[in-house]
Image (cartoon, grey):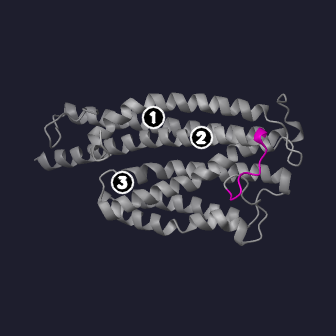
Amino acid sequence: MTALSLGPYAPFIVSSYLLVTVVVAILIAWITIDYRRQKQRLRELDAAGVVRRSGRSATEFK
Amino acid sequence: MTLLDLANPTRFLTLTSRLLPWLAGLTLVLLLIGLYQSAMAPDDYQQGATVKIMFIHVPNAWLSMFVWGVMSLAALGTLVWRHPLADVAAKAAAPIGACFTFLALATGSLWGRPMWGTYWEWDARLTSVLILFLMYLGLIALWRAVEDPSRAARAAAVLTLVGAINLPIIKFSVDWWNTLHQPASVLRLGGPTLDRAFLIPLLIMALAFSLLFLTLHLAAMRNEILRRRVRALQLKQASQSP
């Protein structure tokens, strides 16, 4: 194995890895925020007294 | 738990909440191992250090097609078996697949500039992957444009199956046409042509990105199930209000 040395093409290699990191981070953040938003909406519906067809609470996620 | 049990969204949510932390942890460990192996891989005699871009470009390129394949199976589930989770699976996969396809195009472009002397070339492989990316965006737009989820599901399923024709075109474009893009060097008859020093980090990264997809997909499916529950309850609330 050789030590990490990127040579003259370093900007292209670093940009590629940074881009993948940023896009994956955005994807993870979007999915996490979306989950919290849906749970919040279900809590609000539960507080308003709306129950599911089965009679179970709206906030019963599991 | 049988496969049929998973057709129940509530049971699916239970299983997902148990699986997700383990999957996320395993993905992170594999990504760290893959990144370390990629950093330590030697330079290629032709590509030099830019071979390191391949360790992220190739997994994203594979997943761009794999995700559409998953969506095509889900489309069959929607149209043939009317499986309750089929449309949820397809809709949740589309933005993730679009991101992987964008990353395959962008990292390929960043590799192409120093190696080919250009960021972009209208050759068969690059153009067919660009078409795949546009199809992902079209599908996402379709799901957002049609308000009735069941109508949107059927339309999206048909479009997904039509779009699946592009998958063999992408795969074999390098064989059918004279392209700037190199032919397959891993998934080919006769085995991989890559040296172990490159093949091992590449396979670890491919496995890590596949697990990343599985983790994100399950989480996005969970969100979609909750979104549909919210919609159903909001409709119920609206119908009950005087």
Q: Is residue B150 magenta?
A: no
* Disc 2 crowd, CA 10 A, few/some/many (<14, 14-19, 20+): some
Point out which mark residue A32 bears.
1
Residue at the image point whose x is 67% and y is 34% from the top: B34
- Of badges 3 and 2, the one in the foreground is 2
Element class at badge 2: helix
Residue placed furthest toward the front: B190
Does residue A25 appear in this view?
Answer: yes
Residue at the image point whose x is 41% and y is 67% from the top: B158
* Type of amino acid at the residue the image marks with label 1: Thr
Q: Which residue is mark 3?
A: B86
Return the residue nearer the eye: B128 or B229. Answer: B128
* Type of amino acid at the residue the image marks with label 3: Ala
Element class at badge 1: helix
| Magenta stretch in the rendered image | B188-197
Rendering quarter of residue B150? bottom left
Q: Which residue is mark 2?
A: B207
Residue at the image point whose x is 81% and y is 44% from the top: B50
Label 3 and label 2: CA atoms lie apart by 24 Å
Q: Chain of mark 1?
A: A
